[in-house]
Image (spheres, rainbow, N blue to C red):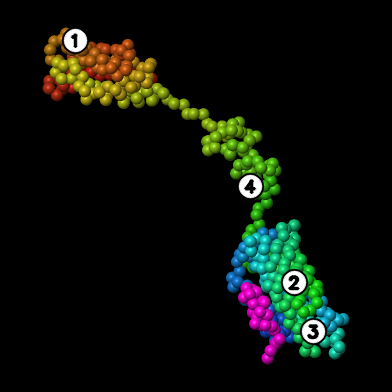
Amino acid sequence: MSTGIPSCGRYKALKPLCEDIRICTLQRSLDNFVKFQQNASSFFLSAFCVLLIPIQSAAAAWQPIERPETGSTILTGALAFETIPDELGDDAEANLGGMILATWVRDDSYFWEVMMSRVENRVSTHLGRQDTEQLHGSFNAGYLFPQRDNWRPYVSLGLGVGRFDNAADFKSDETEFNAALGGFYEISERMFVRGDLRLMGRSDVDWGPAASLGLSFQLGDIAADPPQDDDEDSIPDARDDCPNTPMGSAVNLNGCPDSDGDGVYDDADDCSNTAPGTQVDDRGCPPPEPEVDTEALLREAIEKARLTVYFEYDMSDVAEHYDDDLQNLAALLVDHQNLNVTIEGHTDNMGSEVYNMVLSERRANSVKDRLVAFGVSSVRIKVVSKGESEPQATNDTEEGRAMNRRAVSVFPTID
């Protein structure tokens, strides 16, 4: 049985639009609605089932209405009031009905929605009082304005189809346009009052006003509102030690002015211009450099530079393989100009004591000459001849006597 609903083939000019917004599917849905709409309860149940088609099976997470994010979904049920076109009769007893809207917010402020409504009333016609039914379905696009207090106004435009049907078998199927001005009022995190005024434009029937008022529910998870931050310094008031900081002030993690970012408030910072990353004390100043024990460092350097040179029997020439050790000692003396050194010469017990005193002096002077050659002033080097008087090993063996033929560096005691 034909319902009189126009097909896409009938309206060829609307064919591209049918493909984009599926107006034909909406027409068929309205056709099915006619079979089930015996009373208001069956209407709302059927309308909700039809609306499940455009609503995603799992709604995306939805932020509070003052901050809707891409993917937010809102479901609205409302009372609808609509005037009856003059062609269908006048003196209507009631023009109230129901409306359901499924709204998808995207890009924070723009939204798309599917709207379906049904209004039933009695009007005067040439056949007497007649029951008249109005069915509407449309796809709307709208814009949400910035919120003021709990209000979030919006405007929208829509395109769809409408059916007017009464007991006298008068039936009119129209392409409809609508423009609305409305708003959301936040009651709780998930619930809003929604109302709007709408102008309905029809292809073959006079234009008329309409209005709706209902409740909206947000679907999905609720995102927590941002914590209060009166001075807008990015530190929530709950942990802001300075909640009235002037706008634009650099603050630390406690929300207080800290121009150099060292963690010490400016009013308690004795060094307010420390370089970024500098470790500071409780006054905001770099801690004093730790005292260096220069004497300990010098003792350590002396130990590393101590020199012992061994000689062949009855010889005083310094072998070349001692050059590195001599350079280390010379570097120490050059770096520490107040440090002097004594070079002691030693022999074994071969030969007379007088001869060994002279030989040990020659050995000490040989070392001194090499140090002078490496840049040490000669006046800082003292030579002492020990002869055979201070052996460090036995003179009864060749190995012991070789250990005693030596020259060594001696430094003053560093306390």
**Which is more N-terminal, label 3 or label 2?**
3
Q: Position of residue 45 (x, y in %)?
A: 69, 80
Seen at 62% across and 41% down, the residue is 251
Instruction: Give amino acid for label 4.
Output: Ile
Q: Position of residue 76 (x, y in %)?
A: 70, 71
Q: Nearer the viewer, residue 159 or 278?
A: 159
Could you say whether the residue bearing mark 1 is in a helix, strand or loop?
helix
Instruction: Give amino acid for label 2.
Output: Asn
Give the label on residue 40, or none.
none
**Which is more N-terminal, label 4 or label 3?**
3
**Which is more N-terminal, label 4 or label 2?**
2
Give the label on residue 132, or none.
3
The span from disc 2 to disc 4 (Cα, nearest Å) is 46 Å
Magenta segment boundaries in residue numbering: 1-28
**Which is more N-terminal, label 2 or label 1?**
2
Q: Is residue 218 left or right of residue 381?
A: right
Could you say whether the residue bearing mark 4 is in a helix, strand or loop?
loop
Seen at 66% across and 79% down, the residue is 12
Residue at the spot of label 1: 358
Q: Nearer the viewer, residue 215 or 141?
A: 141
**Which is more N-terminal, label 1 or label 4?**
4
- Tags 2 and 3 touching, CB below 8 Å: no
